[in-house]
Image (spheres, grey):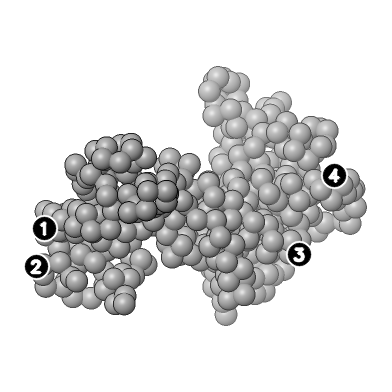
């Protein structure tokens, strides 16, 4: 019979140790990793997918891939960015599989955007405030912006992944940048 | 009124609470191209992405460009801060979702290499997986007070009966424990457990203390002996 002492709590343990255990096949350590990082992975996936529908599936699949490949992660301290790469990869695959060119290129996002400072900070709740800056970017702009600024991808890499001309990606990112700069200045 | 700091974790950026936002002096023109001495924002962004590796003197000597470059850098930090903020707002994963993930990983064990075990039946082929042995090692280390085992590596030809093998474990040790004591108890416990349950010829158990963890509350009294 296992006693509580034989099942030490892992909460206070350095993440490198947790990752080591999980890489060796300890499901309990892996569960802790999933609980700690699922929020960030969900937020990241949502920004690339542009919708919430597939977030559950993409993040679930990503963690299963992570479990299978965790042994190959040579630097346990890099877990978070490693997980984000897996989630990013699978999110992009989903977006590509939709074959929705308007969604990718932002052609369906002709609605005028209120670029005034007042428009940028209309939000009143915490959630809206967060949404106001990143979440309120039109989908195609937000996807490209996140892939560039967070994933650190280059224009041509994003263009190749999303099957868009590089000039389109450049344009989407330029518009996102203008918008985000306005949002950021509004906070200062 | 909710006060939030969207810049949490983003050093050097002054982010007032939501309720003290003022729009009297709002500089939304940091990326105005007329102030960039002939350069474009796109160009500056590319320059930043290149890590400014090849120094562009025209950009570096332009005050307008310098302001814009600083704004672009802040923008990156701002974006990351927003993603972190969104992550914090995510609900805890549902029990149902967690169950689905955990049931999927349960059927994909990290078995590793096969480790043969002698059988009294001459035609029976018995093996223990490396993953199972790692599980034994973890359990043997975890029972030592103050110790939690991390990565476990078994080196040597485990597939050949009688071949010498070495075991290496990373360890998290609770602050306040005597480290050499904990390490030697972990080694002894692992040796004993492997001798009891496997036929591995273990020539060494190496321990690396990878983490000293601070647990809230009073420092536990030092204990001796291995819990059993």
Q: Which residue is mark 3?
A: A53
Q: How many residues crowd around disc 1 within 10 Å: few (fewer than 14), some, or many (20 or more)?
A: few
List x then y, in percent, for residue B28. 68, 50
Q: How many residues crowd around disc 4 within 10 Å: few (fewer than 14), some, or many (20 or more)?
A: many
Q: How many residues crowd around disc 3 within 10 Å: few (fewer than 14), some, or many (20 or more)?
A: few
List x then y, in percent, for residue A69. 53, 46
The quarter in which the C terminus of chain B is drawn is: bottom left
Nearer-the-camera pick, B52 or A73: A73
Nearer-the-camera pick, A139 or B162: B162
Chain identifier of the residue bearing label 1 in the image = B
Residue plotted at (10% across, 67% down): B225
Q: Are marks 2 and 1 in contact (CB under 8 Å)?
A: yes
Q: CA distance from mark 2 to mark 1?
A: 8 Å
Q: Nearer the viewer, mark 4 or mark 3?
A: 3
Give the answer, above or below, for where B183 lies relative to A27.
above
Q: Are marks 1 and 3 on the same chain?
A: no
Q: CA distance from mark 4 to mark 3?
A: 20 Å
Q: Which of the two labelled residues, at mark 2 and mark 1, occupies the earlier sequence position?
A: 1
Q: Are marks 4 and 3 in contact (CB under 8 Å)?
A: no
Q: Nearer the viewer, mark 3 or mark 2?
A: 2
Image quadrant where residue B179 sits: bottom left
Nearer-the-camera pick, A85 or B82: A85
Q: Which of the two labelled residues, at mark 4 and mark 3, occupies the earlier sequence position?
A: 3
């Amino acid at each position: 019979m296992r006693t509580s002492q034989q099942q030490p709590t892992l909460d206070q343990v350095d993440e490198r140790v947790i990752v080591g255990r999980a890489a060796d096949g300890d499901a309990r350590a892996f569960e802790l990793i999933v609980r700690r990082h699922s929020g960030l992975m969900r937020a990241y996936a949502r920004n690339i997918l542009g919708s919430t529908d597939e977030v559950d599936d993409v993040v679930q699949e990503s963690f299963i891939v992570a479990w299978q490949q965790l042994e190959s992660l040579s630097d346990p301290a890099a877990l978070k960015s490693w997980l984000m790469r897996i989630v990013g990869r699978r999110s992009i695959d989903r977006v590509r599989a939709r074959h929705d060119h308007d969604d990718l290129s932002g052609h369906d996002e002709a609605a005028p955007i209120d670029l005034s400072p007042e428009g940028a900070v209309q939000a009143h709740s915490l959630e809206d405030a967060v949404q106001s800056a990143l979440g309120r970017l039109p989908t195609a702009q937000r996807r490209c912006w996140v892939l560039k600024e967070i994933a650190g991808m280059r224009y041509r890499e994003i263009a190749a992944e999303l099957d868009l001309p590089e000039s389109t990606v450049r344009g989407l990112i330029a518009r996102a940048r203008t918008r985000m700069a306005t949002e950021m200045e509004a906070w200062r | 009124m909710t006060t939030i700091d969207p810049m949490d974790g983003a050093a050097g950026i002054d982010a007032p609470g939501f309720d003290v936002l003022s729009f009297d002096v709002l500089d939304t023109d940091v990326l105005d191209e007329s102030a960039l001495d002939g350069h474009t924002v796109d160009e500056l962004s590319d320059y930043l992405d290149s890590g400014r590796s090849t120094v562009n003197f025209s950009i570096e000597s332009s005050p307008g460009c310098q302001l814009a470059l600083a704004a672009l850098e802040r923008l990156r930090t701002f974006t990351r801060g927003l993603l972190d903020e969104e992550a914090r707002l995510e609900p805890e994963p549902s029990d149902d979702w967690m169950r689905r993930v955990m049931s999927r990983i349960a059927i994909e064990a990290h078995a590793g290499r096969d480790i043969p075990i002698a059988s009294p039946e001459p035609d029976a082929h018995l093996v223990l997986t490396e993953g199972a042995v790692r599980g034994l090692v973890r359990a043997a280390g975890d029972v030592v007070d103050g110790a939690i085992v991390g990565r476990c590596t078994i080196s040597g030809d485990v597939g050949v009966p009688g071949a010498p093998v070495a075991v290496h474990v990373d360890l998290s040790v609770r602050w306040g424990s005597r480290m050499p004591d904990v390490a030697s108890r972990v080694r002894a416990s692992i040796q004993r457990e492997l001798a009891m349950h496997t036929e591995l010829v273990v020539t060494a158990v190496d321990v690396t203390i990878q983490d000293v963890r601070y647990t809230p509350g009073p420092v536990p009294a030092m204990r001796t002996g291995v819990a059993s």
